[in-house]
Image: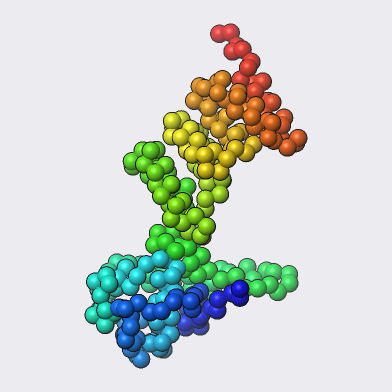
Amino acid sequence: MSNPPRVHTVPGVLTLIVFLSFGPPSLTAQGFRWPDEPRNVSVLGPEVTGARLGEVMRGFTFALGVRCEYCHVGEPGADLSTFNFPTDDKPAKQKARVMIEMVKAINTTHLSQLAALDETPTTRIEVTCVTCHRGRPKPIMLEDLLSDKIASDGVEAAVAEYRQLREQFYGGFAYDFSPRTLTGLGDRLSRAGSHEAALAILALEVEVNGETFSVLFTLGSAQARAGLTEEAIKTFERGEALAPERAKQFFRQQIERLRRPPAPR
């Protein structure tokens, strides 16, 4: 499959990845036509045509996984001709302008400096909305999302949210469901003294991604910090059995440390 084309709005202002396979237009969009001379497009520039503006807007909806009413004044599902596109009443539209300027600065100022330092010419890397948002309005990493959920509603709610997100988004690029996400969160919680939450998150990791020597090392360490010495020893023993030869010594060291009798006071 060939890569989708990139559509440039105003040169040097913004580059958006626009997927042309949106399928048939929605009923609300049928018959709607962007004005030939769009109003209040201060960041994109007055030279932007209506046709090009439509491409930009479709790029935004893909990148953030939202519809027009997210930034513009209008009712969900209503005909687009009823929307007040020029008004700046919604904060999301004002934020979008800031984000467009940020993308412009990254691409034209910072990434261009990196390209100048390349010894040999390489393909220019460009940041777009989808680079960070990946189909979500708020570009938050899964580990941080779950951490916030634990802080606000507890670990059971976080586990439930992880399951729901995995069911909805697994196989896409919105969230990272690879083992490192839950393992990293579990280790962070354990080191912060949130032992119950850490063990629950690491148990979820083992459930969804299976046992690996790396997650077992993290789990064993978390159990040891929680005072679960015997459980930690068994976990480290399972990890040692799975570990490559070069890593087995780290498990043995932890097992020996836990089996060592406490020093007399």
Residue 2, picture quadrant = bottom right
Residue extending farthest bottom:
36
State the quadrant of the N terminus.
bottom right
Colour scheme of the picture: rainbow
Q: How many marks?
A: 0
Q: Is residue 246 left or right of residue 115?
A: right
Residue 78, picture quadrant = bottom left
Where does residue 121 sit, x and y in percent of width and height?
70, 74
Note whether 83 is above or below 211 in the view shown: below
State the quadrant of the C terminus.
top right
Picture residue at 56% right of the left edge, 20% below the top: 230
Picture residue at 68% right of the left edge, 72% below the top: 122
Where does residue 17 sit, x and y in percent of width and height?
51, 74
Where does residue 254 sit, x and y in percent of width and height?
64, 25
Where does residue 262 sit, x and y in percent of width and height?
59, 13
Q: Inspect this view and state whether residue 113 appears.
A: no
Residue placed most toward the observer, 178 or 116: 178
Picture residue at 57% right of the left edge, 29% below the top: 220
Residue placed most toward the observer, 11 or 244: 244
Residue 123, picture quadrant = bottom right
Q: Is residue 146 left or right of residue 208?
A: left
Picture residue at 65% right of the left edge, 26% below the top: 237
Note whether 68 is above or below 151 in the view shown: below
Residue placed most toward the observer, 81 or 256: 81
Q: Is residue 264 left or right of residue 59?
A: right
Residue extending farthest right:
245
Q: Inspect this view and state whether residue 9 appears.
A: yes
